[in-house]
């Protein structure tokens, strides 16, 4: 038996132990995990410093380096996210529907854990704790396969989580960290269809496509976040400008950052110069269509490739549109089903935008940066789905369960003539 299969089978056994835990025990476990992250802070920071040194030596910079970096505040944030997950309603055992059929059968739909979740991710060591906490709260066990750039950070965080597991006599395999980071090992993991119930890749488009192409297990995925802000003719321009600056510059290297600005032609001449000034003061490079370049000097021409791009950097593409319909058409052509925003004071425009856009998250007069599990009340997120399968959008603990049917009867049979 290969090592990866051995680890996965141990994780599957641990999933049975997690399924048996009641809500209060899971809450106590997660609180102890949060406390362990804080008490092990120095060890985690030392491991992260080692990863940062290696990454810098390899030339890593920008968004990737920011995702990798930990400090005291970020570790505190990770611990707090685990506590927030502990405070969530327990999805396991939740009855989502109950009815009595004409034949007297009582039918319930009840949520149960998925089982074993394989989490495959890059750079972000906080995912180690977030994914573990969400999976455990939902009664699952998790196999974590992080990237080589964060190996030491991930190992230190997993070690802290294991302290809490040991305290509660739960097998350490409930949080299994894969330290063998060869591609062939990942492929083997993705093909364990008799053990792994779901794979969730989280990282760059290349990683997600690799997982989707090699997996024999179900995969939740989103390839990229090409997020738009559309400034309607009726928009409050101060509000729209705040949404733009926050969405583009607060953290440009994340998937809910804005990548394209669409502006109605009726407000373009007043809005775009102010927007360009605010963005350029913050170091944003602007690309634009012919009409936007006539209003703002110095913009580089934007191509179709730019409008389809997830820059993950201080770069923004701009387009002036004739009306709401043209904005919707642009998003339908270039969007990635992640997050779209409209700034408008017109209720009918907001209704049309929400109805026409099928993206996982649609915002009306709110920043794209709220497209995040923690901000949407999930405690944290294990990933974002744009696949429209059993989950869509930011995924929390409930998205790591499935519904099954519980049927209670009193001797009913489908064919009465078959009775003895």
Image (cartoon, grey):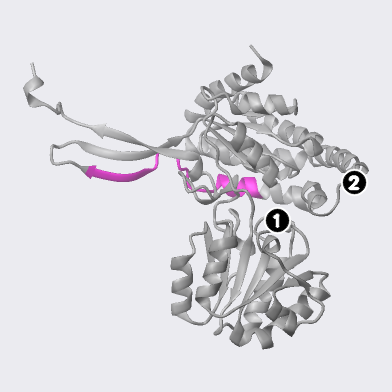
Q: Which residues are magenta?
A: 81-99
Residue 89: x, y in percent?
48, 47
Where, quadrant-wise, is the C terminus in this rendering?
A: top left
* Residue tagged 1: 254
The residue under the point 52% across, 76% down is 324
Q: Is residue 367 visible?
A: no
Where, quadrant-wise, is the N terminus in this rendering?
A: top right
**Apparent side of residue 324 relative to residue 75 in the rendered image (left or right):** left
The residue under the point 66% across, 14% down is 2
Whether tag 1 and tag 2 are in contact, CB under 8 A, the answer is no
Whichever of callouts 1 and 2 sits on the residue coming sooner in the sequence is: 2
The residue under the point 68% across, 40% down is 207
**Apparent side of residue 56 relative to residue 190 in the rendered image (left or right):** right
Is disc 1 surrounded by few (<14), some (14 to 19) or many (20+) residues within 10 Å?
many
Mark 1 and mark 2: Cα distance apart in space: 20 Å
* Residue 89 in magenta stretch: yes
The front one of 188 and 180 is 188
Q: Is residue 298 visible?
A: yes
Is disc 2 surrounded by few (<14), some (14 to 19) or many (20+) residues within 10 Å?
few
Residue 85 lies, with reference to residue 14, above or below; the image says below
Q: Secondary structure at mark 1?
A: loop
Residue 74: x, y in percent?
76, 51
* Residue tagged 2: 59
Q: Secondary structure at mark 2?
A: loop
Indicate which disc residue 64 carries.
none
Residue 295 lies, with reference to residue 102, above or below; the image says below
């Amino acid at each position: 038996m290969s090592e990866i299969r051995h680890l996965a089978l141990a994780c599957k056994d641990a999933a049975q132990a997690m399924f048996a835990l009641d809500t209060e025990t899971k809450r106590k476990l997660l609180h102890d995990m949060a406390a362990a992250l804080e008490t092990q802070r120095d060890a985690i920071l030392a491991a992260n410093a080692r990863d940062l040194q290696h990454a810098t030596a390899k030339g890593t910079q920008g968004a990737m380096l920011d995702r990798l970096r930990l400090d005291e505040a970020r570790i505190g944030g990770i611990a707090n996210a685990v506590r927030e997950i502990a405070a969530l309603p327990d999805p396991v055992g939740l009855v989502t529907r109950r009815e009595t059929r004409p034949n007297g059968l009582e039918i319930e739909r009840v949520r149960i854990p998925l089982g074993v979740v394989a989490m495959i991710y890059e750079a972000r060591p906080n995912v180690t704790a977030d994914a573990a906490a969400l999976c455990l709260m939902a009664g699952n066990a998790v196999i974590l396969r992080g990237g080589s750039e964060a190996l030491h950070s991930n190992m230190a965080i997993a070690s802290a989580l294991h302290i809490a597991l040991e305290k509660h006599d739960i097998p350490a395999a409930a949080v299994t960290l894969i330290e063998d980071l060869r591609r062939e090992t990942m492929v083997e993991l993705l093909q364990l269809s008799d053990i792994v119930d779901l794979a969730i890749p989280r990282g760059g488009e290349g990683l997600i496509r690799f997982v989707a192409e090699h997996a024999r297990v179900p995969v939740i995925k989103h390839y990229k976040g090409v997020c738009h802000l559309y400034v309607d003719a009726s928009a409050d321009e101060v509000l729209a400008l705040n949404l733009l600056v926050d969405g583009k510059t607060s953290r440009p290297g994340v998937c809910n950052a804005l990548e394209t600005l669409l502006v109605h032609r009726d407000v373009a001449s007043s809005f775009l110069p102010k927007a360009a000034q605010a963005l350029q003061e913050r170091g944003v490079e602007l690309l634009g269509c012919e009409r936007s370049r006539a209003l703002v000097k110095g913009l580089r021409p934007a191509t179709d490739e730019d409008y389809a791009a997830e820059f993950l950097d201080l770069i923004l593409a701009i387009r002036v549109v004739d009306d709401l319909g043209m904005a919707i058409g642009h998003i339908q052509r270039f969007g990635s089903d992640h997050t779209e925003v409209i700034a408008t004071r017109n209720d009918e425009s907001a209704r049309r935008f929400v109805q026409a856009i099928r993206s996982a998250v649609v915002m009306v007069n709110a920043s794209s940066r709220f497209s995040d599990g923690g901000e949407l009340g999930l405690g944290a997120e294990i990933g974002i789905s744009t696949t429209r399968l059993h989950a869509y959008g930011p995924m929390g603990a409930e998205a790591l369960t499935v519904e099954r049917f519980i049927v209670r009867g009193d001797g009913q049979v489908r064919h009465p003539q078959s009775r003895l």
